[in-house]
Structure formats: structure tokens, C-alpha cells
Amino acid sequence: MKSFWSKSGLYGLLALLSAASILLFKNAARTQETVTIKVLMQALEAAQWEPLVEEFEAQNPDIDLEIVEGPNATNLVEDLYTSSFLLGDSPYDLVYMDIVWTPKFAAAGWLADLSDRVSDESLGQFLPGDVNGGRYNGNLYRIPFRSDAGMLYYRQDLLAQAGYQPPQTTQELMAISQDLQDRDVVEWGYVWQGKQYEGLAAMFVEVLHGFGGFWIDPDTKEVGLDGEGAIAGVEFLRETIDSGVSPGGVTTYQEEETRRFFQNGTTLFLRNWPYVWRFANEDGSQIAGKVAIKPMVAAPGESSGATQGGWGLGMVKTTEHPDEAWRVIEFITSEAAQKQFVLATGYVPSRRSLFTDPQIVAEYSHYPQLLQVQETAVLRPPIAQYAQASDILQRYLSAALTDRITPEEAMEAAADETRRLLGTN
Ligand code: GLC
């Protein structure tokens, strides 16, 4: 009995020791050979990144690229990153960054300067607006992955049947909408992003530009929100709702709600980003093959503007794995990866060569028009206090759009508060 126990005890101990050593060995191998690189992004896009992640990991077996899913609103993802940096010890190695975050994140010292990692020649292969959106105080903090610009989608089929040319002005957009609504061709004229979030500010920049107004001059810090153009712009948006051209619900819509609304086939015009194209034309879509795009409408005599959007990768300053993080950036922003992503999703590349790539052009016949839209892109003010400035604008716009205050009161208050923020009052 005794010997049995001592024997089995010995075996047990040996088994335990060998299990422990396998575990130790495995852990050692993992920490030596596999590095995890973590990045947070909007849920919608996280799913679309999956094939890229698989391919990256297949080519880089020593790196585990972990995508953490966040909310779809850009400002909510920004808040998550911001609190992780403020609390210290951020779990992220990379920041998948909206173009408007660069000045704030760079000024706060949260990002690594990437200037030495990339030559001017390589940067020259990207769209200049997207590269500039990654610079702050002469340093480079973000490599562009995909570009973005706001545009007008319209029902080509319905306009053609009714004998209309696509609208150039806000007045034409309203008149065509009302006519086709009166004739019961469509239920709604125009849907746009009116919820209180960053998308509202992004959309409003186009309206501002189209009414000859401006938000903040980044050089002089002059604020234009209480100017005539800005107030007229808010009045136009209010008018779309008051006249029934836009559903009252637009004041609660983000991009995806407006896309679904338009895709149901009951609406003539939509303001959105290029990603909608692929969804609108997918199998089973009510409007497949019936949609076209054009630059945003403007007030008569004014020029049209598209808000410059776009996403890229920055590196967290405190990452313990800067070289591995850089390998992810290089792979994701490469021509091959962008091409694969664009073909699969219809997003806009940030590399110039891809706009004329035969395979991409064969898949997306609207790319020539898209370049035209990209060329009119207008920046949101690239200032370190952008997030607060945008928050002020969103709040007052929302109050005016939901009829709590008049457009004039709203814009005067927004201008005052913005001047206080910038210290220019
Ligand atoms: C898109 C744009 C981004 C913008 C956001 C607003 O994602 O690329 O720049 O801030 O929409 O919702």
C-alpha cells in the first residue's frame, strides 16, 4: 500500500512537473515570439477588417493583431481612447484615428511621432489632404488608411423619369423633393445626419461652406458661426424638416439610420459618405443600380463643399512594441491591403494610384465622380480644442434643429461659447 502510494505519488509529481514545464515553455515561447498589438475601432468597421487581420497574421505569425470593437459614433470611440490615455496604462498599441482627432491626441502627447519611419517619397503616394490631416506642429502622427468625403446620393432613376437634372442648389433640392413628394413618387425628399454627435458637425461643415460661411479660421482663431451664411445654413436645415422634405426623425439619425432609410427606396436624396455605395448596390437592396452621387448642393451663387473625413493609424507613444505596431501600420496602409479592402467594402482609398486601378474602376464605376467630390473637400478646423469646439456646435445646432431655440439665437450662443473656448472673446 505504502509503496503504491509513494510510487503513484512520484508519478503524479513527475506528471505535474512536466505539465508545468510545458506550460512554462509555452508561455516563454508566447512572450518571446508572439506580441499582441491592440487597436480599438467602430464595430461596423471591425467586422470589415477581419480578412485584413487574417492575412496580416498569416504573413506575420509573431504578431497577434487584436481588434477591439467600439461604438459606431466616432466621438464615442474617441472618448474611449481619451479615457484610456487619461487613466494611464492604455491597453492599446495603435489608434485607429478619425482625421479630426490628430491635433488633440498629438498635442496631449499620446502619440508617437512617425516622421522618421516614413520617407516623403512614400507619403507622396497618398492624397495630400489625408497626409496633412496626420500632421501636427510639423510632425507626423497618423498614416492614412482610407479617405472620406461627404456627398449627395440621389435616385437617378426617379429624377430621370421626372425629367429632372440632379440638383445643384439647395433650392433645387427642395423644389424637386416637394414635387416628387406631391406626386407620391417618394415619401421623403432628403435624409441627413441630425443627431447630436460628430456626424452632425461633419454634415454641417458642408452646409456652412455651401452658404458661404465658416466655422473657425485655424490661423486667426476667428469664429464665423454667427455670420449670415452660418445662420442661413441652419435655417435651410430647419426648413427641410418644417416643410416635410425631411422626416422629423433626422434629428436622431446617425449615418447608418439615414442609409437604411434611403435604402428602403422611399427617399430621393441622402447626404452620406462613400461607404454607402456598396450597401446601396448590394444584392437585395431596393435601390441597387438606381443610385448616383454628386457633390453636395450649395446656395445659389456659392460653391459646393465636401467635408474631408478619413481614418488612419497612429501609434500610442507608450506602446511596448513600437516596431511590431509599425509593421501593422505598414501592412494595413499598403497598396495591396487598401486595394483588397476597397474592393470588398467600397471605402475610398488614401493612395492615389488606387483611384485609377483597373480592377477598382471596373468594380466601382463612380470613382471618377468620387475624385471630383474628394477634390472639393473642406477640413473641419484642425485645432487642438477641436473636440470641445465640435461639442459646442453640436449642442446648439441640435437645439435649433429640434426647435428649442431659433437658428439665430443658436448660432450666436455657439459663436460666443466658441470664442470663450479659444480665448478670443
Ligand atoms: C466618417 C468620417 C469621419 C467623420 C465621421 C462623422 O467616419 O470619415 O471623418 O468624423 O464620419 O460621423
Image (cartoon, helix red, strand yellow):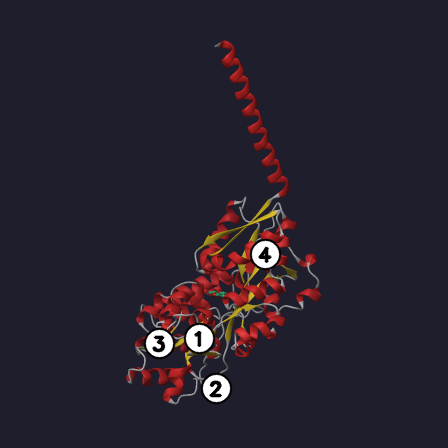
As drawn, 286 above or below 107:
below
Q: Distance between the residues labelled 4 and 3?
A: 38 Å
Q: Position of residue 68 (x, y in %)?
A: 49, 51
In the image, which is nearer the foreground, mark 4 or mark 1?
4
Label 2 amino acid? Gly
First in sequence, mark 4 or 1: give its number. 1
Q: What element carries label 2?
A: loop
In the image, which is nearer the foreground, mark 4 or mark 2?
4
* Residue bearing mark 4: 314
Residue 301, numbered label: 2
- The front one of 412 and 275 is 275
As drawn, 299 above or below 7:
below
Q: Residue at x 58, y 64 (%)?
A: 338
- Please give the count of numbered marks on the rendered protein: 4
Q: Residues within 10 Å of mark 3 (few under 14, many from 20)?
A: many
Label 1 amino acid? Ala
Q: How far apart are marks 3 and 1 (CA)?
A: 26 Å
* Residue bearing mark 3: 267
Which quadrant holds residue 379?
Answer: bottom right
Q: How far apart are marks 2 and 3 (CA)?
A: 27 Å
Label 4 amino acid? Gly
Q: How crowded is mark 2: few (under 14 residues within 10 Å), some or many (20 or more)?
A: few
Say whether mark 2 is within 8 Å of ligand 1.
no
* Residue bearing mark 1: 230
Q: Is mark 3 on a helix, strand or loop?
A: strand
Q: In this orientation, does residue 381 appear? A: no
Q: In this orientation, does residue 301 appear? A: yes
In the image, which is nearer the foreground, mark 2 or mark 3?
3
Q: How far apart are marks 4 and 1 (CA)?
A: 33 Å
CB of mark 4 within 8 Å of CB of mark 2? no
First in sequence, mark 3 or 1: give its number. 1
